[in-house]
Image (spheres, grey):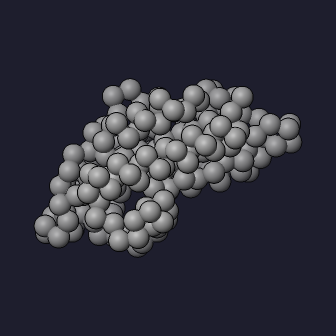
Amino acid sequence: MGGWAIWITGLPGSGKSTVADAVVRRLHRQHIRTQLLSVDMVRKVLTPNPTYSEEERTMVYRALVLLAHLLTQNKANVIIDATANRRRYRDWARKRIRRFGEVYLKCPLQVCMKREGTRKERFGAPSRIYLKGQTGASKTVPGVGVAYEKPLSPEVTLDTSRLDADECADRVVRFIYEKFRPRGSRSGER
């Protein structure tokens, strides 16, 4: 049996990277080896000077899905941290990865904008993207310049304007145990 993949999606500033990091740390403490795949890490390799065009996004998300697919084929567990503003990007993963789940971090745009406006560059994500979108410096910001297509049937939906990162991470880990029944490295399976 291969590994599994969870895609954490939501608007920029919804808490994806913070929740993804917390989920991975919890799983590691339980001896469940898990690889975090961040679209920002992949983008830095594929497009060091990103334009965020539709063509570029398609290329980056195809590469991200391929990496996740290959890792799960080799029995690795994967947490994908990526906005993936088009539903089709996440659907590609659902079609390719047999053991897959989607986690939607629901958060009002105004809350996301406020959070993102005060954060420092962290987890490789660019900062102040909403300001760039509002001033016209960028026309490709999900939720402002381009649409964010929220999931139609995510396995988990969490309102990050009401739940903190720890509560969200606990619920994602609970879902992983319920759906995939992972066992820690002490029992021989990862």
Q: Quadrant of the N terminus?
A: top right
In the image, residue 147 lies at what x, y percent? Answer: 21, 46
Spot occupied by residue 82 in the image (x, y as percentages of width and height): 43, 50
Residue shown at 17%/55% (left/top)?
145
Residue 39 vs residue 154, the one in the foreground: 39
Image point (28%, 64%), residue name: 51
Q: Where 135 sits versus 162, above or below? A: below
Which residue corresponds to the image point at 44% horizontal and 62% vertical from the top-left? 46
Question: Residue at 63% of width from left, 51% of height from top?
Answer: 35
> Which residue is more in the foreground, 77 or 74?
74
**Residue 96 in the image: x percent, y percent?**
51, 32
Q: Considering only vertical position in the picture, is 17 above or below 175? A: below
Q: Is residue 162 left or right of residue 136?
A: right
Q: Position of residue 153 (x, y in %)?
A: 38, 26
Q: Is residue 8 left or right of residue 24?
A: left
Is residue 47 in view from this perspective? yes
Q: Nearer the viewer, residue 47 or 90?
A: 47
Q: Is residue 83 visible?
A: no
> Where 150 falls versus 57 (above or below)?
above
Q: Hey, which quadrant is residue 137 in on the image?
A: bottom left
Task: Locate residue 119 relative to residue 122 in the image: left or right.
Answer: left
User: With 108 as the anchor, is 162 left or right in this view?
Assistant: right
Image quarter hosting the C terminus: top right
Q: How many marks?
A: 0
Would you place residue 151 above or below residue 123 in this image?
Answer: above
